[in-house]
Amino acid sequence: AIAYDSSFWSQVARGSHDTARSVVEAAIARAALLFEEICIRVRLSHLEGYCTASQDPYRTAMATNDIGCGSRRGALQVFKDIWQTSRAHIRRDTAHLFYGTNFPGS
């Protein structure tokens, strides 16, 4: 499963859902090639994207201004919380967040 937030939509996709989907599909295609060598199939089960910050559930993750490495609470932990609570019904082996925010030190 893949989600992209409003910062990805505006900064990377330049306000185009088609561009956002193309970037995501290109990343999946590259991953599929790598995993094919070890007999793992990559398939996108869910894609969600947000173009306005006011409707973006991941804005709280970006507002932490921290990626969340180590013991610090940041975007990673907020993303995990969202997917464990309000996205638990979505079938997936993994979930990824594409974002356009630059975090300090990243």
Image (tube, grey):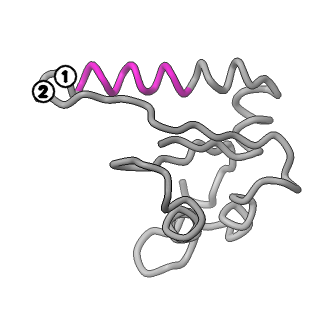
At x 55%, y 48%, the residue is: 97
Tell me which corner region of the image, top left, top right, bottom left or bottom right, holds residue 78.
bottom right
Of residues 98 and 40, the one drawn nearer to the viewer in this rendering = 40
At x 11%, y 29%, the residue is: 38
Q: Is 25 displayed left or right of 54 in the figure?
A: left
Q: Position of residue 96 (x, y in %)?
A: 48, 47
Please rate how many residues cluster around mark 1, counting C-alpha atoms within 10 Å: few if below 14, some from 14 to 19, many from 20: few
Residue range of the region highlighted in magenta in the rendering: 24-34
Tell me which corner region of the image, top left, top right, bottom left or bottom right, holds residue 34.
top left
Residue position for label 2: 39
Q: Position of residue 89 (x, y in %)?
A: 50, 57
Amino acid type, residue under disc 1 in the picture: Glu
Tell me which corner region of the image, top left, top right, bottom left or bottom right, holds residue 23.
top right
Amino acid type, residue under disc 2 in the picture: Cys
Q: Position of residue 18 (x, y in %)?
A: 71, 18
Q: Are marks 2 and 1 in contact (CB under 8 Å)?
A: yes
Q: Is residue 91 above or below residue 78?
A: above
Q: Is 53 displayed left or right of 21 in the figure?
A: right
Of residues 49 and 31, the one drawn nearer to the viewer in this rendering = 49
Q: Does the magenta portion include 80?
A: no
At x 44%, y 31%, the residue is: 44
Query: Disc number at residue 36?
Result: 1
SS assignment at label 2: loop
Query: Disc number at residue 47?
Result: none
Q: Is 45 displayed left or right of 86 in the figure?
A: left
Q: Position of residue 13 (x, y in %)?
A: 72, 27
Cα gap from disc 2 to disc 1, whole angstroms: 5 Å
